[in-house]
Image: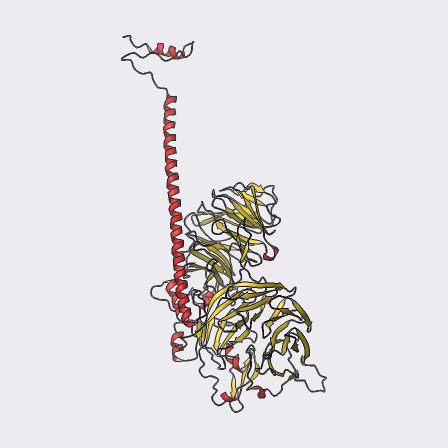
């Protein structure tokens, strides 16, 4: 056995002049050659890489399992929510069926308030229930909190105990002359003489007790959607319902089941909506109520109770459960000015934070720990921008990152240690847009923005400079950006196009052209499967895919709405407004039967008695005669140049009365199956006389607002803008000066708001124009009114006591312009003015009409 060679020899073997000559032969008992440091590092790195790869694989497996479990949990939640919704629907349908055989259930939050006369029970309840009368300051009396302090319990208390109120009617107490049977009421100091019918003269007591309304209402369906000026307000929930809003109602619409549910917690216009990451909780923000819109001292006198009627008139945010429709938190009362412009839940932390931007001059942005307490906890507030803010959102990967965009800006906010650090977006040498109109996030956390120039920009995560730009994505502003689960991107623009892109913002070739009649896509969101749900600028909600064309899910009016005409023979009604469009609606199918562009602003409408003809009055003094089935225009007529305020056929169908804003009522004879109209005469307006002549007492001195025919088709009663009640011989077109002769006339309808039968509908201190409309049911002693404060009220008819009890309903956010009952009184329809909403209410007998 040879000895181990010396170190030097070994070194020479590897490093000698001849280079590497191969490894030395190993002999028994010899030591292995030394390992170099490079080989150690290589082996170590290989081991670390193997461990890292194994760790990455395990993390990926865990993420996959977590994702699968999350999907399973979401599926279970959605299934449970859908089951609860269906159970609630069935229970509501059974309860409603007990009251009305033809009713259809719509589970809603009960917001009915019952006003009583001055009884002991009313005084007792008023100690614990707050009262509110439109047109005056809310009462200081507040709802007493339950011991549990639960906001949900407080909501239940308010909805289960109908609100009571004692009110005196008329700006000045009405005076009653029992001998002559005349009651004199006052509106803004102007006296109005009302004659008590002969059968009631001996027993009538103006301040006596009034009957409760014999029926109640339940909101069944809402037609319309607010897309004309709101963004990011349509979402598909796991229950299959589409959630959106119009007026003061949030609608949850299940298209497959053709069922709607309604959240009615708001008191005025809803402006924004956000869905929690769990897809079950929803936050909605509203504008200031009628009494607070012009208040400048809103921060100085905040309400002490967030659920008092006074607080409801302040701009605020409501967080609520989409399954039970229960309000969980009311946030921002006395902190938000004017209105809530946009909302967003945080995503990276599971939705524990809520960010809101208001419409104050500085567009204040506030961040809330929304679940802390009944009113939430404001973590911070800062001035966002002097310019309009259109959108706000949290990053899905960075809990502390918030993005806002709007006029002349996109801002990147970082939330740390209770402070917000702001960095403005830098466009560098790229054209700065006038508006950044939309934002979204990729799965990597990069921001995608769309602007008024039609461009798409990508901003890398953590930065505030443009990384990539796609010019001319749309011809005009980009309204919506949707990033799908697979990374694909869908955009919608003012050009009426919906475009699909891959994750690298390369066009896939899929494009949807939305018909002009539906407007431009304001918001595009994911539906079930590959379906898209689209909200448009013309207040439509559409559904479809790139393969199958979009079809309307919901349509609505786009401008102020005034005309309403229930069909005399079918479960249908017609609406028309300043958008120049007439719609015929089917109340059972909840769909549009037909629509018609009449080319002018519509003000009024009426069906002929047989329902075959519909008359449309316009703001130019023109009115059209149209076939109610074929939409064929038979003729058009002109009466003055002022709006046609009211149209009404006589009960016998032989006459048509046309009330104009020029103070006149025009009478037409009807012939040829309501297709021919011949003017009989004009109920003349007042004529100025010379000084030496006596003043004329003929006709109205202001515009005609309402009219009714007598049951025998001989007489008219009319109201005007200066609070007059006049009577006319329709055949002669002459005013009846001796109004006492008309005290016992039976009227076919009750649409005049200033009559003896409607004395009790006028609240204290009201202006004569505050109540816009009223209608009596066809077969029930029931009277409905709509006012300037978005309220619908039900009275027993006649409402002739000064302290008439009523049921009060909310939902509209603007002046209620018209109410009307279907021919069988199964439903009542109401129309809003600027809120453009049409609401369908089920009428059911009020079995609990006794006083509490």
Circle count:
0
Instruction: Please state, as top left, top right, bottom left or bottom right, where the C terminus lies in the image.
Output: bottom left
Nearer to me, 580 or 791 = 580
Image position of 553 with respect to 165: above or below: above
Quarter of the rendering containing residue 565: bottom right
Quarter of the rendering containing residue 101: bottom left
Nearer to me, 201 or 142 = 201
Name the residue located 58 percent from the left edge and 86 percent from the top edge: 742
Please state if 633 lies on the left or on the right of 796 as rendered: right
Task: Locate residue 114, reporting x and y percent.
Answer: 44, 74
Nearer to me, 612 or 349 = 612
Task: Locate residue 791, reporting x and y percent.
Answer: 50, 70
Image position of 412 with respect to 306: above or below: above
Please state if 653 lies on the left or on the right of 322 as rendered: right
Instruction: Please state, as top left, top right, bottom left or bottom right, where the N terminus lies in the image.
Output: top left
Image position of 44 with respect to 649: above or below: above
């Amino acid at each position: 056995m040879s000895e181990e060679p010396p170190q030097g020899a070994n070194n020479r073997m590897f490093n000698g002049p001849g280079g590497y000559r191969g490894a030395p032969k190993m002999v028994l008992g010899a030591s292995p050659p030394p390992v170099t440091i490079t080989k150690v590092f290589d082996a170590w790195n290989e081991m670390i890489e193997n461990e890292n790869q194994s760790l990455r694989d395990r993390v990926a497996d865990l993420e996959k399992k977590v994702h699968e479990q999350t999907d399973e949990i979401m599926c279970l939640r959605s299934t449970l929510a859908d089951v609860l919704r269906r159970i609630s629907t069935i229970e509501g349908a059974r309860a409603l069926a007990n009251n009305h055989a033809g009713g259809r259930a719509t589970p809603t939050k009960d917001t009915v308030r019952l006003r009583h006369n001055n009884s002991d029970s009313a005084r007792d309840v008023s100690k614990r229930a707050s009262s509110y009368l439109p047109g005056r300051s809310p009462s200081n009396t507040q709802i007493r909190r339950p011991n549990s302090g639960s906001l949900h319990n407080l909501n239940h208390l308010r909805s289960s105990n109908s609100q009571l109120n004692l009110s005196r009617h008329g700006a000045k107490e009405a005076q009653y002359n029992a001998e002559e049977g005349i009651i004199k009421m006052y509106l803004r100091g102007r006296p109005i003489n009302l004659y008590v019918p002969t059968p009631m003269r001996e027993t009538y007591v103006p301040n006596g007790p009034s009957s409760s309304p014999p029926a109640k209402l339940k909101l069944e369906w809402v037609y319309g959607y607010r897309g004309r000026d709101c963004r990011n307000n349509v979402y598909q929930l796991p229950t299959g319902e589409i959630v959106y809003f119009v007026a003061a109602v949030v609608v949850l619409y299940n298209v497959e089941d053709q069922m709607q549910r309604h959240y009615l917690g708001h008191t005025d216009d809803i402006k924004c909506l956000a869905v929690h990451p769990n897809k079950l909780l929803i936050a909605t923000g509203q504008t200031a109520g009628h009494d607070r819109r012009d208040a400048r001292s809103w921060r100085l006198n905040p309400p002490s109770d967030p659920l008092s009627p006074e607080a409801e008139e302040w701009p605020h945010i409501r967080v609520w459960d989409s399954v039970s429709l229960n309000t969980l938190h009311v946030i921002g009362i006395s902190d938000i000015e004017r209105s809530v412009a946009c909302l967003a839940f945080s995503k990276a932390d599971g939705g524990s934070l809520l960010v809101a931007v208001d419409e104050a001059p500085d567009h204040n942005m506030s961040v809330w720990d929304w679940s802390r307490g009944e009113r939430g906890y404001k973590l911070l507030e800062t001035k966002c921008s002097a310019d309009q803010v259109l959108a706000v959102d949290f990053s899905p990967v960075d809990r502390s990152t918030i993005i806002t965009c709007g006029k002349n800006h996109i801002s990147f906010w970082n939330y740390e240690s209770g402070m917000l650090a702001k960095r403005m977006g830098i466009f560098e040498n790229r054209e700065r847009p006038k508006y950044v109109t939309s934002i979204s996030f990729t799965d990597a956390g990069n921001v995608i923005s769309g602007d008024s120039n039609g461009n798409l920009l990508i901003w890398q995560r953590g930065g505030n400079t443009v990384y990539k730009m796609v010019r001319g994505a749309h011809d005009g502003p980009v309204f919506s950006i949707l990033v799908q689960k697979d990374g694909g991107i869908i955009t919608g623009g003012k050009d009426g196009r919906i475009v699909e892109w891959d994750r690298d913002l390369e066009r896939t070739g899929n494009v949807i052209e939305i018909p002009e009649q539906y407007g431009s896509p304001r918001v595009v969101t994911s539906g079930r499967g590959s379906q898209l749900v689209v909200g448009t600028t013309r207040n439509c909600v559409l559904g479809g895919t790139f393969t199958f064309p979009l079809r309307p899910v919901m349509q609505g009016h786009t401008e102020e709405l005034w005309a309403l005409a229930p069909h005399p023979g079918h479960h249908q009604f017609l609406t028309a407004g300043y958008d120049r469009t007439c719609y015929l609606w089917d109340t059972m199918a909840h769909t549009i039967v037909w629509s018609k562009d009449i080319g002018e602003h519509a003000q009024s409408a009426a069906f002929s008695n047989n329902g075959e003809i519909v008359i449309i009055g316009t703001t130019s003094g023109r009115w059209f005669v149209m076939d109610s089935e074929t939409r064929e225009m038979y003729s058009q007529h002109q009466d003055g140049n002022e709006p046609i305020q009211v149209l009404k056929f006589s009960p016998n169908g032989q006459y048509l009365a046309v009330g104009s804003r020029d103070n006149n009522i025009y009478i037409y004879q009807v012939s040829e199956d309501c297709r021919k109209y011949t003017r009989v005469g004009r109920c003349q307006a007042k004529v100025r006389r010379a000084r030496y002549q006596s003043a004329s007492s003929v006709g109205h001195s202001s515009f005609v607002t309402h009219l009714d025919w007598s049951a025998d088709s001989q007489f008219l009663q009319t109201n005007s803008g200066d609070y007059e009640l006049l009577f006319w011989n329709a055949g002669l077109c002459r005013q009846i000066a001796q109004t006492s002769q008309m005290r016992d006339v039976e009227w076919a309808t009750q649409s005049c708001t200033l009559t003896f039968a409607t004395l009790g509908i006028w609240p204290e201190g009201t202006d004569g124009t505050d109540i816009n409309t009223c209608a009596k049911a066809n077969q029930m002693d029931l009277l409905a009114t709509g006012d300037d404060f978005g309220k619908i009220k039900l009275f027993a008819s006649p409402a002739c006591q000064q302290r008439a009890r009523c049921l009060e309903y909310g939902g509209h956010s603007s002046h209620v312009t018209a109410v009307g009952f279907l021919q069988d009184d199964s439903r009542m329809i109401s129309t809003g003015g600027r809120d453009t909403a049409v609401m369908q209410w089920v009428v059911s007998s009020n079995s609990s009409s006794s006083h509490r």
